[in-house]
Amino acid sequence: MTVLQALNGYYERMARRGEVEAPGFSREKIGFAIELSVDGDVVDVLDLRTLSGKRLVPALLGVPAAVKRTVAISPNLFWDKSAYVLGRTAGEGRRTADEHAAFKAAHAALLAGANDPGLVALRRFLEGWTADRFDFPPFAADMLDANIVFRLKGDFAYIHDRDAARTLLAARETTQGPQAICLVTGRRAAIRRLHPSIKGVNGAQSAGASLVSFNLDAFTSYGKEQGDNAPTSEEAADHYGAALNRLLDRETLGNRIQIGDSTVVFWADASAVGEEAALAAEGFFHGFFEPAADADGNDDDAGEAAKIRDSFELVEKGRPVETLDPRLRPGTRFHILGLAPNAARLSVRFWMTGDFSVFARRLAEHSRDLAIEPVPWLKQRRRPSVRYLLCRTVALQEKAENVPPLLAGEVMRAVLSGSPYPRTLLAATITRLRAGDSPGSGWHAAVIKACINRSQEDKVPVGLDPDNASPAYQLGRLFALLESAQYAALGKVNAPIGDRYYGAASATPARVFGPLLRGLKNHLADARKRGRGGWIDQRIAEVMTKLPADLPRSLRLEDQGRFAVGYYHERAQRAVKDTEPEATHEDDKE
């Protein structure tokens, strides 16, 4: 099933729920309504915005479908932003006068001869309006650049919703132009020349961007122009545009998540399983990637996390998907679309469709691959959602905007397809460790383990493995023990060896471990005087028996990862073996 066919199916589901606009209409953000008398005089200005948190949010109203604007001046009918409607804007507005003139001209032609009181009032208002009247009440600066509609005094419906207005709009709809077999429906119909604008993709133009577009000869075939290259009927284009814009709606947020620069929307096909099962699938998928937080910003409590983990283990072993939620049903068709901005267009980062149980199993596998002991995210009471995981492991200063843009989409694709994680994820995680991220946090070790275990036959263990055959893993353990000896001897120091030598030790061990081992004797002696670290000497001797006589001169990327995991496993023993709490060490703090 193609993207457009699946979106067309979601539109039909919206229609069954009574959430679709009439043909030729779309939902837009409207800030204000101007109330008119039958003579076209301004009676009042109605603020349609509502308070959401600390900001005012425009109302979402069904209005005549927005025109597709490029550089040309093209007014909407019965509504538009203040520059078109009133001839005023908050910016420089070099084209404001022309935009307002176009709005007046379009409505003069549309409303000529109309005798409906609402339409007559709007025509008279536009005939008598001058931009300088905006400087007087009831107009206010908040209206500048907001979308505006009209309403007749004493009427609850807006003017564009009046029967006479809808009749005029319907009369303007034409089926002229070429007809062809629609790629979405398979029926012969008039073809849409310009596809609808899609709004809500992070980084894309706020006015909307095209999912389907042809504007250069290089994008065309057999001499066809514009929409003829991908023939889609007027009806199907309206349907998929309305469905995708609803899924991307920032006010609902139930069917979209943001991973790096990729805006991901998802939905279930309810036709075979019913609305309840479809909503359950969508809710579970959203909850996995965006866990619900409590008042303190923490995710679900430890008991809830354990229940989810146990359910995932059952699904991974082949148990039915109802294990996750009794409302889920086998055979639920699920669709996932990843979009990224690309100038005036949208790029499809990935498109996946299949049985929801397959995706649930892959999410379970992702959780299994990240499993590591001790569990690093229990301290923050957060489950490792993909976005938070990327922030903790590959983003400078752990900021979402610093996640490498292409990497986020590749990781999401790997999670959903069950394919190996991109090697760039392993490289970026190790780079952050060498740049100063704390290898003791555990987040990096979990990602490294997942990357290696999906692509290598030589697996990395979940918990401490004293007999692991990898020299790199044992070197990581050794480095953690050398650090423990320093802490046991000196306590908290300004420049521990972990901060000074971790990067070099994990990449070129032969060069670094010699000097560190020579200082070990003094550290152990000082530690004994303080009555601490008695366990370290024996443990180092045990690790040394697992290492070759000649330490490796360098470690390749995967072995640097094994070094990091070995370091984390061994370091976790410090709190158990020593009386000094782990959290007293500066680089363990979150």
Image: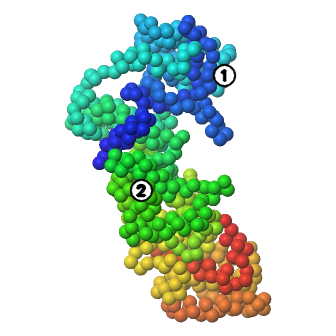
Q: Nearer the viewer, residue 418 or 159?
A: 159
Q: Nearer the viewer, residue 501 or 312?
A: 312
Which residue occupies 25% across, 36% down? 182
Q: Name the quadrant of the C terminus.
A: bottom right
- The span from disc 2 to disc 1 (Cα, nearest Å) is 50 Å
For residue 328, the mark is 2
Task: Note whether residue 552 is visible.
Answer: no
Q: Amino acid at mark 1?
A: Ala
Residue 467 in the image, given as x and y percentages of width and height = 50, 88
Inspect the image, locate mark 2, and give the three-letter code of the amino acid beneath it. Answer: Leu
Question: Is 474 on the left-hand or right-hand side of 18?
Answer: right
Image position, residue 525 (x, y; %): 73, 92
Q: What residue is shown at x 52% (from left), y 45% (from top)?
A: 253
Mark 2 falls on what kind of element? Answer: loop
Left-right relation of 536 to 375: right
Task: Give the percent coordinates (x, y) of residue 406.
Answer: 45, 55
Q: Which residue is mark 1?
A: 140
**Is 70 drawn above or below residue 479 in the view shown?**
above
Q: Is residue 100 above or below residue 457?
A: above
Q: Looking at the rendered structure, which numbered label has been put on residue 37?
A: none
Does residue 114 lie above or below 247 as drawn?
A: above
Residue 94 drawn at (x, y percent) = 55, 22
Query: The residue tagged with tag 1: helix, strand or loop?
Result: loop
Residue drawn at (57%, 79%), measured in percent from left and top? Answer: 569
Residue 239 visible in the current orientation: yes
